[in-house]
């Protein structure tokens, strides 16, 4: 792998200028199993390499650096044709050591979880899903050996399995009864879709990081359609008042905050005093589920509520503290919410997330549009918002029609007939 080759199309920048812009690189074989590619863009090109790994029977692709189309090559990040060949040869030599062992789904999963733990919030839940449903079935398999039908069969089986029950580690896994009603079957298919999404995310991460060469196998597997329209539950204003009055004083503060902001429980328990801006009447959420910050405006009542909470507190202290002076933990609210629902006669008892639904639903019924609600909740786009709250906004559309559309003389005709 020591020699370099010539190619009239790629040798010089003058020759490369004449090439049409192309997403697919112009490939040149420079050694057995090793190609160097020049991908031409509108503002210049980059060098790519394609290396055939014999143990995996797949090509590995990797970007080497920019081409010297506008600046002289430096043998580091800007490369001439000759420098790109030398770097491709050296990289192929290193890659041959790294990827001699075929990648398994387990290896891809560990690679994904290492990234996920640093960049996402729901690591524990995702790891639990992987260990329960993905690794037992696919962990030992080489990614290159996966077939689309294998994944389709597994996906279908997930939808037909009974729901799992939370079970102590020392005991054998327990299951609920297999649902036979339409709502139950829809729910199982929705769960299967979410697990399929995790598997695809694992494999796509390996593909995008160039650990594997192809993603067609799982792209062919489609989720079940029309199964995500779950009926969401939200409280009326009267029920909200009953729930607040029935709650323990320190928990009452957390409930009010959820209804005034629509924030998640974890976002509120991590909220510090400095994140509440009295002057702009906003709450700053910096610890969101998707790692995206957002500002939530407060109503006049909400502003007064937060003013009372933060009065005399230092900026680096938590806004919400338990009555014993300790910090709210992840599930410390669960029993308190269940008790409050019981005393407030709210049956069945709600989860804390239903307060977030209540916030959004009451806004939708009052006339807020989906884009506004989406931004307030911190959704990435309006698709999730629309799925849950569009039917409530439809009432706003009906009210608008009733208020603004003219009568076209119909009311006048009815009055004339009444006089006659």
Image (cartoon, rainbow, N blue to C red):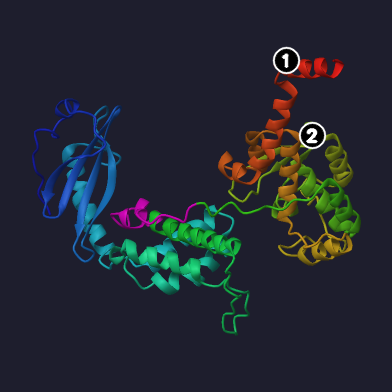
Q: Which residue is mark 2?
A: 281
- Residue 208 appears left or right of 406: left
Quadrant in which the C terminus is drawn? top right
Q: Residue at x 79, y 47 (%)?
A: 259
Nearer-the-camera pick, 417 or 171: 417
Residue 265 can be seen, yes or no:
no
Nearer-the-camera pick, 371 or 208: 371
Nearer-the-camera pick, 342 or 378: 342
Q: Which residue is mark 1?
A: 409
Q: Helix or strand or loop: what does disc 1 sit on?
A: loop
| Magenta-tinted stretch | 205-225
- Residue 108 appears left or right of 267: left
Q: Helix or strand or loop: what does disc 2 sit on?
A: loop
Q: Position of residue 222 (x, y in %)?
A: 41, 54
- Residue 198 appears left or right of 32: right
Q: Are marks 2 and 1 in contact (CB under 8 Å)?
A: no
418 up-or-down from 311: above or below: above
């Amino acid at each position: 792998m020591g020699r370099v080759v010539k190619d009239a199309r790629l040798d010089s920048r003058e020759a490369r200028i004449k090439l049409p812009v192309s997403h697919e690189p112009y490939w040149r074989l420079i050694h057995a199993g090793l190609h160097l590619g020049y991908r031409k863009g509108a503002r210049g090109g980059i060098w790519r390499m394609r290396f055939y790994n014999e143990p995996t029977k797949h090509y590995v692709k990797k970007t080497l650096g920019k081409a010297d189309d506008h600046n002289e090559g430096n043998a580091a990040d800007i490369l001439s044709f000759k420098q790109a060949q030398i770097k491709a040869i050296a990289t192929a030599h290193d890659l041959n050591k790294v990827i001699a062992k075929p990648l398994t789904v387990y290896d891809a999963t560990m690679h994904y979880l290492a990234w996920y733990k640093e960049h996402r919030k729901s690591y524990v839940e995702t790891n639990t899903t992987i260990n329960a449903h993905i690794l037992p079935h696919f962990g030992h398999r080489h990614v290159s050996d996966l077939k689309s039908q294998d994944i389709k069969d597994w996906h279908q089986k997930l939808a037909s399995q009974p729901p799992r029950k939370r079970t102590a580690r020392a005991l054998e896994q327990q299951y609920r009864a297999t649902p036979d009603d339409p709502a139950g079957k829809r729910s199982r298919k929705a769960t299967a879709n979410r697990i399929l999404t995790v598997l695809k995310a694992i494999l796509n991460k390996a593909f995008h990081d160039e650990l594997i060469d192809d993603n067609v196998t799982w792209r062919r597997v489609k989720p079940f359609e029309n199964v995500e329209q779950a009926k969401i539950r939200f409280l009326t204003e009267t029920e909200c008042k009953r729930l607040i009055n029935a709650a323990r004083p320190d928990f009452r503060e957390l409930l009010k905050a959820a209804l005034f902001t629509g924030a998640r429980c974890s976002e509120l328990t991590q909220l510090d005093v400095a994140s509440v801006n009295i002057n702009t009447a906003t709450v700053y959420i910096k610890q969101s589920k998707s790692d995206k910050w957002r500002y939530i405006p407060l109503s006049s009542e909400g502003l007064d509520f937060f003013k009372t909470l933060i009065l005399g507190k230092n900026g680096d202290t938590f806004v919400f503290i338990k009555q014993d002076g300790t910090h709210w933990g992840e599930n410390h609210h669960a029993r308190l919410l269940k008790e409050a629902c019981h005393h407030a006669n709210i049956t069945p008892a709600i989860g804390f997330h239903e307060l977030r639904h209540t916030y959004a639903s009451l806004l939708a019924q009052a006339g807020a549009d989906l884009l506004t609600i989406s931004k307030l909740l911190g959704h990435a786009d309006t698709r999730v918002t629309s799925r849950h709250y569009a039917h409530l906004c439809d009432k706003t559309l009906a009210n608008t029609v009733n208020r603004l559309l003219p009568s076209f003389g119909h009311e006048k005709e009815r009055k004339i007939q009444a006089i006659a």
